């Protein structure tokens, strides 16, 4: 390990980085900006480290604005890897006097939602084909009906899930007419921040700003990339008291949703990255990273309201994706409660110690808060309890992290045998065969060391483990 590490450190030094490693944490800083705060990455020695990701992390820590504000701290979770937009996935940045739209990106409030159901796994698998056919219709072929009144959509974007529920109770349309709206209202306490941020409907794309019945093709859609809906079995319970409080029991059926704000997030994220560039003071050198922060208080408030609008949309998108599963289970198995365990965002900017904390591909891990860390579709997922670790900026990983890009997985010459890809025994339902390859377990880092390193660092504690039964990929 040591000779290989020394070669890596020398190579990164030639690329303009000062890097140190103590066997657990990498500390990195740009040589050209010794006054920037050092960025830290929790990374066990048996996981790969990528120089490009370290470059992106150091550049994020070195951001500043000519009109003031500063980056105070930057951390990265052990699943971190390079991001296409110049910010490493797994980055967490604490700022004062400025916000960084690029540190959240366009998949605003990508996040996780977890339900459990008291259905015997054997009984579920006996009706696997009927379940899959119904869900393929909903997720892939448009049989879902997400019609809603324009007042409900406006209330969602402005006030989040509580506003949407209030308006929907008065005019339930489409699949909402079959929902238990009282249950959804009770479950709002298990959504991070109550699923309610202060948004502005004016940030909706033009196609959603109309009167009457709105049929939004983006709602209740999984999306691409690493997004999924997965049915699982609660394989083991480690913290029985906590699991009992959260309604989780060994042997239960579970379903997990990983999705975000879809085109709404793209609309807001792209617009504000351009606005941040356009607002940069004339004549001031541009950031070498291409990531432009905002320092003007008025623009900061405008951006945060726009981001909140997309985040509210994402909360509803995950709710509807999960409701399609819950309604289908009720069609097949009768009166199934399938309660929500928790819904938590990843890519979002929130207040933190007098400033702002932006997470990109990282999960809030406040004290006693449920933390959901999915593995690949061939590996265990983890339900954890956050410990509010301030040194880690109260943040945990949002998954295992990619080890290989989608291009490298699907290109000619790559190994495509099921056993090489880790797909043996994996039940993946997708529209395109190449999605199975791009998202195969071999594309991801092993989840075990990622989770163990965070337990050792007192960031999270294990509550339960969940084993995949089938995974839907769009």
Image (spheres, rainbow, N blue to C red):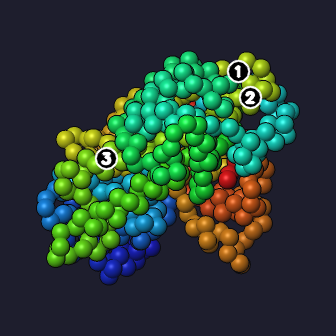
Residue at the spot of label 2: 329
User: Residue 11: image x %, image y %?
Assistant: 37, 79
Q: CA distance from mark 1 to mark 2?
A: 7 Å
For the point 38% across and 60% down, which residue is it?
Answer: 271
Q: Which mark is residue 288?
A: none
Task: Please tell me which of labels 1 and 2 falls first in the chain.
Answer: 2
Q: Are marks 1 and 2 in contact (CB under 8 Å)?
A: yes
- In this rendering, would 271 be left or right of 444? left
For the point 27% across and 41% down, which residue is it?
Answer: 351
Residue at the spot of label 3: 304
User: Residue 3: image x %, image y %?
Assistant: 42, 74
Q: Secondary structure at mark 1?
A: loop
Looking at the image, can residue 94 be seen?
no
Residue most extreme to the front: 211
Task: Bin the neighbour count of mark 3 within 10 Å (Cα to Cα): few under 14, some 14-19, many 20 and up.
Answer: some
Q: Which mark is residue 336?
A: 1
Q: Are marks 3 and 2 in contact (CB under 8 Å)?
A: no
- In this rendering, would 15 be left or right of 43? left
Task: Give the label, 1 or 3, closer to the camera.
Answer: 3
Residue 362 to residue 88: above or below: above
Q: Secondary structure at mark 2?
A: helix
User: Residue 34: image x %, image y %?
Assistant: 18, 69
Between 341 and 11, the one nearer to me in the picture: 341
Q: Secondary structure at mark 3?
A: helix
For the point 54% across and 21% down, which residue is it?
Answer: 170
- In this rendering, would 289 be left or right of 213? left
Residue 161 to residue 409: above or below: above
Q: CA distance from mark 3 to mark 2?
A: 38 Å
Task: Please tell me which of labels 3 and 2 falls first in the chain.
Answer: 3
Residue 332 to residue 441: above or below: above
């Amino acid at each position: 390990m040591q000779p290989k590490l020394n070669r890596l450190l020398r190579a990164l030094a030639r690329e303009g980085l000062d890097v140190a490693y103590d066997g657990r944490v990498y500390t990195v800083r740009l040589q050209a900006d010794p006054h920037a705060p050092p960025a830290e990455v929790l990374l066990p020695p048996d996981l790969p480290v990528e120089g490009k990701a370290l470059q992106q992390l150091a550049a994020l820590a070195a951001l500043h604005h000519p009109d003031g504000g500063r980056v105070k701290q930057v951390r990265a979770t052990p699943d971190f890897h390079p991001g296409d937009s110049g910010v490493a996935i797994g980055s967490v940045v604490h700022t004062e006097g400025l916000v960084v739209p690029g540190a959240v990106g366009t998949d605003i409030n990508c996040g996780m939602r977890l339900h459990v159901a008291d259905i015997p796994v054997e009984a579920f698998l006996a009706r696997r084909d009927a379940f899959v056919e119904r869900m393929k219709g909903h997720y892939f072929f448009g049989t879902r009906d997400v019609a809603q009144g324009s007042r409900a959509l406006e209330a969602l974007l402005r006030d989040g899930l509580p506003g949407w529920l209030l308006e929907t109770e008065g005019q339930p349309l489409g699949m909402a007419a079959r929902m238990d709206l009282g249950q959804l209202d009770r479950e709002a306490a298990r959504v991070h921040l109550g699923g309610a941020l202060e948004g502005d409907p004016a940030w909706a794309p033009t196609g959603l700003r109309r009167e009457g019945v709105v049929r939004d093709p983006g709602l209740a859609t999984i999306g691409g990339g690493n997004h999924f809906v997965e049915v699982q079995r609660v394989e083991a319970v480690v913290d029985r008291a906590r699991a009992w409080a959260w309604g989780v029991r060994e042997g239960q059926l579970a379903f997990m949703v990983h999705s975000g704000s879809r085109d709404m997030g793209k609309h807001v994220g792209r617009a504000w990255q351009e606005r941040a560039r356009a607002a940069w003071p004339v004549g001031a050198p541009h950031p070498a990273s291409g990531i432009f922060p905002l320092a003007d208080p008025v623009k900061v408030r405008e951006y945060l309201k726009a981001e909140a609008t997309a985040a509210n949309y994402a909360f509803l998108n995950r709710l509807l994706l999960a409701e399609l599963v819950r309604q289908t289970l009720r069609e097949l198995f009768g009166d199934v409660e399938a309660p929500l365990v928790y819904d938590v965002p990843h890519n979002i900017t929130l207040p933190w110690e007098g400033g702002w904390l932006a997470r990109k591909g990282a999960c809030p891990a406040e004290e006693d808060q449920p933390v959901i860390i999915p593995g690949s579709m061939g590996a265990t997922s983890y339900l954890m309890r956050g410990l509010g670790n301030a040194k880690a900026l109260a943040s945990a990983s949002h998954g295992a992290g990619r080890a290989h890009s989608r291009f490298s997985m699907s290109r000619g010459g790559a190994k495509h045998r099921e056993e090489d890809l880790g797909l043996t025994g994996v039940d993946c339902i997708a529209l395109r065969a190449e999605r199975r390859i791009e998202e195969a377990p071999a594309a991801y880092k092993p989840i075990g060391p990622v989770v163990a390193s965070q337990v050792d660092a007192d960031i999270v504690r294990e509550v339960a483990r969940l084993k995949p039964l089938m995974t839907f990929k769009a």
